[in-house]
Image (cartoon, rainbow, N blue to C red):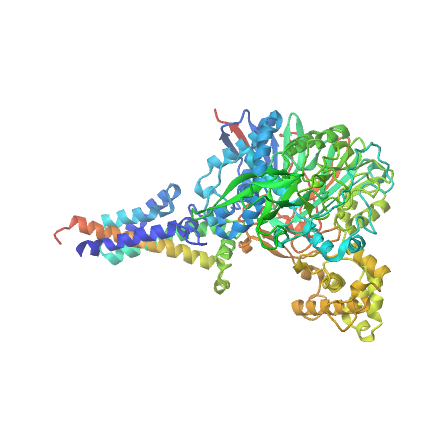
Amino acid sequence: MRFIAHFWPLFIAVALIYLFHHSWGVVPPLGKVFNPFQGFLQNEGTNLIKENEAIFIEGLMDEVVVRYDDNAVPHIFANSDDDLYFAQGYVVARDRLWQMEFYTLVAAGRLTEVVGEGALEYDRFNRRLGMARSAIAITKNLEADTLANRILQAYAAGVNAYIDQLAYKDLPVEYKLLNYKPEHWSPYKSILMLMNMRNTLNGGSNDYRLSNVLAQYGPDVVADLFPDYPAVESPIVPEGTDWTFSPLAIPAVPDTVSALPDSNLLALNVPAPRPEVGSNNWAVAGSKSATGLPILANDPHLQLTLPSIWYQIQLSSPHVNAYGVALPGTPAIIVGFNKDVAWGVTNVGSDVMDFYHIRFRDTTFEAYWHDGQWKPTTMHMETFKLKNGKEIQDTLYYTHHGPIVYHEAKPTNYAKGLPVGYSMRWVTNETDGADVLTFHYLNRAKNYGEYRRALSYFTAPAQNFIFSSNAGDIVITSNGKLPLKWKGQGKYLLDGTLAAHDWQGWIPNDQNPEVRNPSRGYVSSANQFPTDTTYPYYLDWKFAHSSRAIRINERLEAMVGATTDSLRALQNDVYNVDARRILPHLLPVLSSNESTRKSEAFQAIEQWDYLNAADAVGASIFENWLDELLAGIWDDEFPKDKRLVYPSLDRTFELIKNEPDAKWFDNVNTMDTVETMDDIVRESFKSALMMLRDRYGNISEGNWAWGTVKRTRIMHLVPNFTSFGRTGIINGGGGGIVNATTGTHGPSWRMVVQLDTEWPVAYGLYPGGQSGNPGSKYYDNMIDRWANGELDTLLFMKHDDEESERLQHHVSLKPKK
Amino acid sequence: MLYLLIVLIGGLLSYFGPWWVIAPVCFAGCWWRSPTASYAFWVSALAGLTLWLGYSTYLHVLSEVDLVSKVAGVFTGGAPALANVPGTILVFVIAALVVGLVSGFSGLAGMKVGRFIHRPAE
């Protein structure tokens, strides 16, 4: 008793320490996190002036100077490329370590390890896509490539030098809140970062949905409603451009072009292509610019997140001096410029993801039927580690196409009891090439020839690489590995038993679509069709809707004496080409009714100037109306929840203009009435207004302003960390608008570069900040300027001891002897 | 005196040691000299509170961004009932509870265990 009377406080104290030292469910270890000496308060950036510092690091050969400007952009000056990439890794990790590791966990299907079982299905899907296995194979291949391996190793060593210096108190706050620690970096992880990009830009497919359409309506309806080229288009390579190469023999279209769908599982898992992930780039030739030399602009559209996907950096060594944005976790600059050239990217988005219906021999999944014989599958065991230490296993099978993303045995399968599945051929799982070398060489390119050489290393995701030089070149090349296909191959699910359905090889790199110095004086791309129908190879039946491309090309066509500000203004253009195209056909339908005509909503849209400006009420009505209109016309025949797909916007507009009596306007769900196009137009207008009223109250300039309705927000990568995001961002734009800012996606980096024979002048900005630390003022400091359409003047230094009042402090990285 | 000693030694060790390093300081301090159990508890809890809340306030005042409210938002995100509590108060209350309880009970434990060992005949 006496013992207990004296020792109970000790037991309680120990129990309390144990309690607060561990994480319980989603609650992090409170003792660690709330202790000001080590916890999250250590992540609060101070407003004390940053001092110059010297850091001694093992692995460096020579001193590296990193000068930080007033936007926290590091300007790295190294005496060798090895030290340069080492320092890039070190410096980026200092600002973005948590983010870069998080991306690799996503691509590798390992999120369960940090967030728990909730992420299991997401992880399982990502593993079944095969990205982690392909990243391993790519890394292994690159070990044989001396240069690529050296770059990746140096970068990883730099990241690890930073990680090794970290004490708990220095960890990014997300590690503290989610209670885990960073692993060592490696070349494999840099490749995983690139796999993530491949997935984002190439990881969507409508094959399954369109196969359902084919099964339900037949080939004539597909040909009519889902044509292989839009009615209105402005392709990247101008119409009428001659092809100067002799093409390879194009494979013949086989008798059977599709496999019939037999389950909805595949469509449930594989997302449709993401129209909001697009981009713009263009360059005007000297003939159109005020200076007589080219000006180039680029704005890649991605999901807007905090920390930002991009990181501004200047990389300088005796062999290179380039400025631009890098992806945290990968070496070199992805979009940028040097003294002589500038380059940028938009996504090509051609069909590089196909699904093969696989017939297995038996339930062991050991063999599948292909080209008249049974062929063996390969099998891999995937292990998922949960946060609580538990492990879950999943078997991944591969055919010669690639991973089997889904398989099951069901009584409805065409051979009863035998399982079927879908194997995926996806360019993301191609393991040759060295994407990282493309950027390494682009950073150093001096002219068109070096640009082309750089492109030849690139595999995926195929990009429209824009380029301009101070020698006067303006060029766009749709570059990357593009499969050689028969016309229409992969529009539907393919039959895995037929050899004719295999990919037939590759379009030769030098025959990828390209336009160089066209007579019109500009080149541009906005994810539209790369070419008109004269290009000998089949790329896809559908690309991004043409509205952005049309607007960009209209304005560039009219542009004379262009300046960097003309291009900046074009990046912020909010003109709605779709409204101009279709409203003149819709409004007369409404105006025949007097009460509608006199309504405030009708007046607002009738007087609207087609600008998706932040204060435009007409834009809010139009955008919501268009959604309702599409659903009104198509959702009865092609319901999305039944895994079908609507015809394109382009086809819908043509239908409204030219075929107002088409049967598709009738709502087949109402048995006793036959709706006309006019009925659908009126009804959809009404329901759009009702929805706006429900959500935003009665119509008024404030309530229904497009900026309010669009609700642009930039959230943290962890969905639950809402307070780390930024909401209430008011700006214009929209999905099919040049300023492609929607609620969650938009220009993730805007850059304008004016080439010069002496020294280029460049501007740029992205919606976030250099620091990944929510406690830093550089976490989101560019968002407001971005929303206003401003650009920062980029400080492109000539040498490390350059004087500028914008330079704030420097860090010397010194080799530890 | 004991209060100052815990604050000083605890503060010094907290720079290097784990978050719970305040606990052995309170334990040893109250073992060494504490007239009563209640004194041991309260002087330790107050010293812990002074140290953590004082340093937290210092960091928070110097900060360029209100990370405290952002982190509080992470905690209240799943608990709408707490949404209206100002972030700073929530964070300081949690920190106070953690350090108050841990140092208070450690001090009390030190005093009690000390008595047990030094006065076995009592």
Decide: is A636 above or below A540: below
The residue drawn where x is 49% and y is 36% is A184
Among all residues in the image, which is located at the extreme left?
Answer: B121
Q: Is residue A34 left or right of residue A740?
A: left
Q: Is residue A607 above or below residue B99?
A: below
Q: Residue farthest to the bottom?
A: A595
Q: Is residue A732 visible?
A: no
Seen from the viewer's position, the closer of residues A136 and A538 is A538
Rendering coords of residue A376 (x, y %): 58, 37
In the shown orientation, is residue A301 left or right of residue A122? right
Q: In the visual, does A168 lie left or right of A122?
A: left
The image quadrant that residue A361 belongs to is top right
Residue A165: x %, y % from top left: 47, 35
Residue situated in front as seen by the camera: A617 or A228? A228
Residue A387 in view here: yes
Q: How many marks?
A: 0
- How far across and how far down the image is residue A452, in percent? 74, 31
Residue A153 percent coordinates (x, y):
56, 30
- Give the quadrant of residue A284: top right
Q: In the rendered image, which quarter contains the N terminus of chain A?
A: bottom left
